[in-house]
Image (spheres, rainbow, N blue to C red):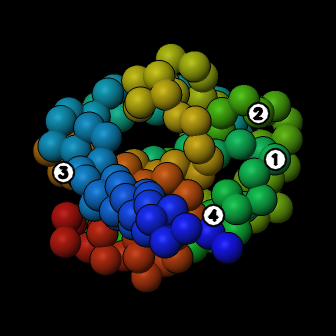
Amino acid sequence: MPHKSSRISWSMARMLIVAACVLALASPSWGAGKPAPNFSLKDVLQGKEYSLSQFKGKVVVINFFTFFCGPCRDEMPDLNKINNELKGKGLQTFGIALSSNPTQIRFLVKQLGLEYPVLIGNDKVSDAYGSIAVVPTTVIIDKEGNVAQRIEGTRKKEVFMKLIQPLL
């Protein structure tokens, strides 16, 4: 039979772990309030080059993903809907493919019917945005070009809308 003090210690340890996780989720996201790093990357379908600096004055959503990421594929149709609903109100959405073959990405863009530019990323842009280690990672940039949010993992359309609409 476990000793009472070891049960208390284990309970305390679990409470500390939960508290640390809650604090981590509640703390400001990477780069919040700081200027978003500029990039120049090519669109996977047409080879057109896009730079973040072209879109100052718009709210920009950047979704980092990889070809083999199932949750990324699940999230992309919602991002496409958001883009279509809000692009006339000052939103620009980009997908940035990391560690992916351009041929596979072209197939994915066509398969999902994505209407926002999907760019071929690299280590430089990943590092500039805090070394993207989890996909999907979505960065929301305000009209002044500052990082408003960095979100790791998938979110539903409603969550994104609540984060984006106040910035428009």
Q: Residue at x 49, y 72 (%)?
A: 4
Image coordinates for residue 155, horizontal then vertical, percent: 52, 69
Would you say residue 117 is visible in this rendering?
no
Decide if residue 29 is in sight here: yes
Q: Quadrant of the N terminus?
A: bottom right
State the CA–CA distance, disc 1 to disc 4. 13 Å
| Eye-nearest disc, 1 or 2 | 1
What's the residue at 19%, 64% (across, down)?
A: 167
Q: Which residue is mark 2?
A: 100
Q: Are marks 1 and 2 in contact (CB under 8 Å)?
A: yes
Q: CA distance from mark 1 to mark 2?
A: 8 Å
| In front: label 2 or label 3 | 2
The amino acid beneath tag 3 is Lys
Point 72% across, 29% down: residue: 99
Using the image, determine if residue 106 lies above or below residue 111: above
Q: Residues within 10 Å of mark 2 (few under 14, many from 20)?
A: some
Residues packed near mark 3 inside 10 Å, few (<14), some (14 to 19) or many (20 plus): some
Name the residue tied to disc 1.
Answer: 68
